[in-house]
Image (cartoon, rainbow, N blue to C red):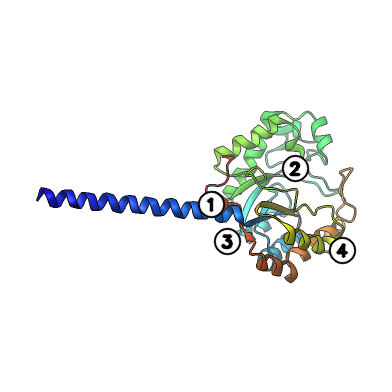
C-alpha cells in the first residue's frame, strides 16, 4: 500500500514537473517570437473632439488598421463618442488626458467647475490653447490631479472601461511633477500609459508628413521596420466643413489641418497598407492585449 502511494506521488511530481517545463518552454517560445516580430500599436487621438472625428474613428476601426483610440473627455462630442464605444465593446479605448483646447473659436472647459481648477483656465473659464499659455497661467499640481482624475471618473461613470491613458499635446510632459501625476493615476486605476510601455514612437511618426505623401511614407516604414514594438499615433478626421473650420493656435500647428487628418484616415484604411502588414506578418495589437500579456511595464 505504502509502495503504491509512493509511486503515485512520484508520478504526480513528474507530471507537475513536466507541466512546468512545458509552460516554461511555451513562455520562452512566445518571448522569442515577440523578439523576432514587428509589433505595431496604431493609436488614434482626439476622439470626441468633433462629430467628423467620431465618424473618422468609426471608419478607421471598421475598415482600417487602427487598434485603439483616446477620448478627450471634456470635448463637445464626447457623449457621441461614448455611444459609439458602448456599441462596439471590442474597440480598445483610452482616456486622452487633456488640459488644453487649441482651436480658434472652438474651445472647451474642464470637467470640474472651472472655479475649482482656476489655475488651469483663462479668464473665460476655458483651457489654454498652448503649452506655453498653460504654464504661464501657473497651473497648480493639485488642481491638475483633480481635473485629470475627474476626466477618468467621468469616463468610468459613462460605462466605459478604458484600457490605457495618454496625454493631449505636450503640456503634461513639460514638468516632472505633472508626469508624476499621470503616473500616480495610472497606478491607481491600473492602466498603462501609452508611450511609456517600451514602444518606439519615433520611427512611425508621420504627423508632419505632407498629406499626399502619408500613405507612401507609411508603406515604406512598414516595409523597413525591424523587429520590435512600435507606436503609430494618428489623428483621424474627415474633409468636412466642420473640420475645415479648425484653426490650430499653436505656433507650430499645422495649417489646413483637415488635409492632414483626412489623409491619415486614407492611409490607415488603405488596402496597400493592409497588404504590406499582411505580407510582413506585422502583429497589430492594443493596450488591452499588451496588459493581458504583462508587458505594460510602468505599472
Nearer the observer, disc 1 or disc 2?
1
118 or 59, which lies in front?
59
Q: Which residue is mark 1?
A: 31
Q: Secondary structure at mark 4?
A: helix
**How far, Cα to Cα, is label 3 from label 4?**
31 Å
In the image, 250 versus 12, the foreground residue is 12
* Crowd around label 1: few <14 · some 14–19 · many ≥20 (10 Å): few
The first of marks 3 and 4 along the sequence is: 3
Q: Earlier in the sequence, mark 1 or mark 4?
A: 1
The residue that appears at 70% across and 68% down in the rendered structure is: 274
Residue at numbered disc 3: 90
User: Relative to residue 31, is residue 216 depicted above or below?
Assistant: below
Q: Which residue is mark 4?
A: 212
- Position in image of residue 92 (x %, y %): 61, 56
| Marks 1 and 3, the one that precedes in the sequence | 1
Residue 92 vertical position relative to residue 143 in the rendered view, above or below: below
Q: Which of disc 2 and disc 4 is earlier in sequence? A: 2
Q: Which quadrant holds the C terminus?
A: top right
Residue pointed to by mark 2? 109
Q: Nearer the viewer, mark 4 or mark 2?
A: 4
Specify which label sits upstream in the sequence, 2 or 3: 3
Mark 3 or mark 4: which is in front?
Answer: 4
Q: Nearer the viewer, residue 147 or 178?
A: 178
Question: To which quarter of the image does residue 289 belong?
Answer: bottom right
Q: How far apart are labels 2 and 3 at the CA level?
A: 30 Å
| Local crowd size for mark 3, using a 10 Å CA cut-off: few (<14), some (14–19), many (≥20) | few
Dot 2: within a 10 Å radius of its alpha carbon, few (fewer than 14), some, or many (20 or more) residues? many
Compared across the picture, whether 160 is left or right of 19 comes to: right
Q: CA distance from mark 1 to mark 4?
A: 38 Å
Q: Nearer the viewer, mark 1 or mark 4?
A: 1
Q: Mark 4 and mark 2: span between their CA atoms?
A: 35 Å
Amino acid at each position: 500500500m505504502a509502495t503504491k502511494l509512493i509511486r503515485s506521488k512520484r508520478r504526480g511530481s513528474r507530471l507537475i514537473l513536466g507541466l512546468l517545463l512545458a509552460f516554461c518552454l511555451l513562455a520562452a517560445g512566445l518571448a522569442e517570437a515577440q523578439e523576432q516580430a514587428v509589433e505595431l500599436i496604431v493609436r488614434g487621438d482626439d476622439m470626441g473632439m468633433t462629430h467628423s472625428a467620431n465618424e473618422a474613428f468609426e471608419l478607421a476601426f471598421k475598415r482600417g488598421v487602427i487598434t485603439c483610440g483616446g477620448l478627450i473627455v471634456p470635448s463637445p462630442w464626447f457623449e457621441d463618442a461614448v455611444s459609439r464605444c458602448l456599441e462596439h465593446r471590442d474597440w480598445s479605448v483610452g482616456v486622452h488626458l487633456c488640459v488644453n483646447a487649441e482651436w480658434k473659436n472652438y474651445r472647451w472647459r474642464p470637467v470640474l467647475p472651472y472655479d475649482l481648477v482656476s489655475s488651469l483656465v483663462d479668464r473665460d473659464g476655458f483651457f489654454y490653447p498652448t503649452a506655453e499659455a498653460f504654464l504661464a497661467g501657473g497651473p497648480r499640481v493639485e488642481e491638475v490631479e483633480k481635473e485629470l482624475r475627474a476626466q477618468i471618473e467621468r469616463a468610468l461613470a459613462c460605462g466605459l472601461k478604458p484600457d490605457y491613458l495618454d496625454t493631449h499635446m505636450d503640456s503634461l510632459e513639460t514638468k516632472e511633477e505633472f508626469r508624476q501625476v499621470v503616473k500616480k493615476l495610472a497606478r491607481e486605476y491600473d492602466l498603462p500609459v501609452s508611450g511609456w510601455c517600451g514602444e518606439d514612437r519615433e520611427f512611425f511618426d508621420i504627423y508632419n508628413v505632407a498629406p499626399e505623401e502619408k500613405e507612401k511614407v507609411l508603406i515604406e516604414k512598414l516595409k523597413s521596420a525591424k523587429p520590435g514594438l512600435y507606436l503609430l499615433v494618428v489623428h483621424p478626421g474627415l474633409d468636412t466643413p466642420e473640420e475645415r473650420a479648425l484653426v490650430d493656435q499653436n505656433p507650430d500647428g499645422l495649417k489646413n489641418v483637415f488635409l492632414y487628418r483626412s489623409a491619415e484616415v486614407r492611409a490607415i484604411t488603405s488596402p496597400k497598407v493592409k497588404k504590406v502588414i499582411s505580407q510582413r506578418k506585422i502583429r497589430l495589437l492594443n493596450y488591452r492585449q499588451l496588459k493581458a500579456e504583462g508587458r505594460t511595464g510602468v505599472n
